[in-house]
Amino acid sequence: MTNTRDTRMVMIVDSEPAQQRFLAALVSRGGWRSVIAADTDTALAKLGTQEGMALDAVLVDQGAPGMDISEFVAELRRWRPALPLVVITMRNGVEVAVGAMRAGASDFVQKPIAPDRLLEALDRVVSTSGPQGELRPLTEKLRAPLAFEEIIGSSPNFRSALAIAAKAARARVPVMINGKPGTGKEVFARAIHSASPRARGQLVMVDCSAVSPGLIGSGLFGHERGAFAGAFDRQVGRLVQADGGSIIIDHVECIPLETQAKLVEFLNSGEVQMIGGSIRQSVDVRIIATSASPLDKLIEAGHFREDLFYALSSAQFTLPSLSERRGDVGPLARHLLARIGGLPGMATIGITDDALRLLAAYAWPGNVRQLQDVLFRAAVESKTDVLTSADFRAIEATLGGGTGSAGEVAINGEAIGVTLYLPDGNLRPLEEIEADVIRLAIGHYRGRMSEVARRLGIGRSTLYRKLSDLGIDTAA
């Protein structure tokens, strides 16, 4: 059980002093106090001390000296079964992570560590609010890029975004991708690069939400030695590193105004000037920007430059949330399970129609990323080669004990859901339900509007009026 102190405590299990200091400083930003153990044996010994009894979580590096990481997790679970534990793995350490998860780890993160993601993971594993178990998302998985033909989705609003992305990939213009967290912005960005004439060039990614605002400009443009306090060495910027290829600027809304002005200048001139430098270097790079926040509102508030928005938006589209394309949940779940089954340490795993109906009835506030995380955890913990509704108890509990109350339906064996009730037990507004039904019909009948109207029992003119009133995009 998490204690009630104002400052939470985490044990860091790592043998490297520099990494110990880095992790301790990082977690302190999230309000955590840390205690250090240099190896797994020391960590287990500390559990029985006064300090150990006050722990809220454990953070262990897979390379910590001592016993095998899975053995350590299992041993810790034997002594402190309720103590949350997060494992830090190498970038290609999925097999290690799978073993640790099966032994009882709460979550894992991969190196290089993104500060915000690690803090989110720690906050998540100690959270006592909201759905537990499989609804605690994992942070890093399934990183291989997808081609456009591998991206799953048949709803009209999703196909519209896919068509714009595929067309933009063949051009040289900047691209702006909008969408809520977890909708697949990075997947689309990587697909655009892979399908572009620059596919053989470097793909560089900058997550502006994981970098201090004061360092974003240095990261993008580079800096000369002594350009500012702490600039002990010359650093080449990411824009230069991506010369001849593409750069993904994730969370572009986090860039401070001063750096936004430099980015506008670069887009106009194609030249990079290091911070503290005087030489300008021509760079040929394609920018793919993503934003989780509506930029028009940030522009109105004076937090985002309008000229930068237009410079980045030669091609732009918005990815719909998973709740806006519920008919895609079934095919998407099968596709993700196929990819999960191909990971090291994992076996091929199927899923029953009942389980798909349950997943389709859920609202998925975390979007595709959350669905992937739920399936990954269920696959890791399953003792069989087929997932059933019993593997998703937390979702079932969130829906109020079953899919029947959620009002889901199945068409031709695919799980397609229309949620009737809100989490508080009250009915959703009729307009929202009607919009979901129309989207479901358009996706099921592949955009054949005459067939959609006929099956819904309304005229085509009535259908198009409803589409306009409900703000549903029918572009294919």
Image: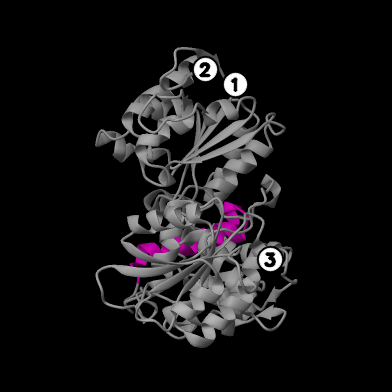
Q: What stretch is highlighted in magenta?
A: 428-452
Q: Can residue 33 be seen by looking at this rendering?
A: yes
Q: Mark 3 points at which residue?
A: 95
Q: Mark 1 points at which residue?
A: 284
Position of the C terminus, as image quadrant, is: top right
Q: Position of residue 245 (x, y in %)?
A: 63, 29
Residue type at mark 2 is Gly
Label 1 element class:
loop
Label 2 element class:
loop
Q: Main secondary structure of the magenta part?
A: helix
Query: Which of the two marks, 1 or 3, is nearer to us in this view?
Result: 3
- In this view, the residue in front, 15 or 370, is 15
The Cα–Cα distance between marks 2 and 1, rounded to whole angstroms, is: 7 Å
The Cα–Cα distance between marks 1 and 3, rounded to whole angstroms, is: 38 Å
Q: Position of residue 364 (x, y in %)?
A: 47, 65
Specify the label residue 270 is tagged with: 2
* Label 3 vs 2, first from the N-terminus: 3
- In this view, the residue in front, 461 or 37, is 37
For the residue carrying disc 3, how many other residues have a C-alpha within 10 Å: few (<14), some (14-19), or many (20+)? some
